[in-house]
Image (cartoon, rainbow, N blue to C red):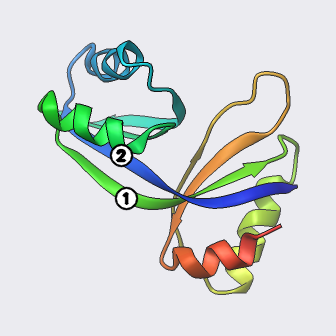
Amino acid sequence: MIHSVKAGKEFVVVSENKVGMLARVTALLADRGINILAISAQAAGGVALMNFVTDDALHTRDLLAKKGFRAQENSVLLLEVEDKPGVLMQVTKKLAAKKIDLLNIYASASASYGPCVLVLSTNNNQKALVTLKP
């Protein structure tokens, strides 16, 4: 089920919802060799919201600022989990049993049904980290 749990950093970029905005952000990271480990993006009205975790938080932060993107950095948990039915249910049941409120969750996709990465933030990440340790 859960292979590992660790603390991580998530970046939230809020921008005008324009065609190609996600392409601009992802090209900026790719051009510097920064890998996106997990991402969620959506638009509402004229606003775009991109949440993502990279393999190099320090350089991501600096690069986004240098290129003028407004980015918020949040503490999150990174769970490496099996990609199979019921895993998300088990994770969320453990959090609910400890009265930990899940605020946001998204995931990577595994290429061949291997492990994937769940990114989550809660009202108490430290308690969640202890609760979800394998």
Q: Is residue 54 left or right of residue 17?
A: right
Q: Quadrant of the N terminus?
A: bottom right
| Residue 9 point in image, percent of width and height | 44, 53
Neighbour tally class for label 2: few under 14, some 14-19, many 20 plus, Cα within 10 Å: many
Q: Quadrant of residue 62?
A: top left
Q: Is residue 8 left or right of residue 45?
A: right
Q: Is residue 32 left or right of residue 91?
A: left
Which residue carries the number 1 mark? 74
| Residue 49 point in image, percent of width and height | 31, 40
- Residue at 69% in and 86% down: 98
Q: Is residue 28 above or below residue 93?
A: above
Q: Which mark is residue 11?
A: 2
Q: Are marks 2 and 1 in contact (CB under 8 Å)?
A: yes
Mark positioned earlier in the residue sequence (2 or 1): 2
- Residue at 63% in and 86% down: 99
Residue 101 visible somewhere in the drawing: no
- Residue at 77% in and 72% down: 93
Neighbour tally class for label 1: few under 14, some 14-19, many 20 plus, Cα within 10 Å: few
- Residue at 44% in and 19% down: 33
> Label 1 is placed on what type of residue?
Asn
- Circle 2 sits in a helix, a strand or a loop, which is it? strand
- Circle 1 sits in a helix, a strand or a loop, which is it? strand
Q: Quadrant of residue 30?
A: top left
Q: Quadrant of the C terminus?
A: bottom right
Q: Is residue 116 left or right of residue 112?
A: left
Residue 11 visible somewhere in the drawing: yes
> Label 2 is placed on what type of residue?
Phe
Q: Quadrant of residue 60?
A: top left
The residues bearing labels 2 and 1 have C-alpha atoms spaced at a distance of 6 Å
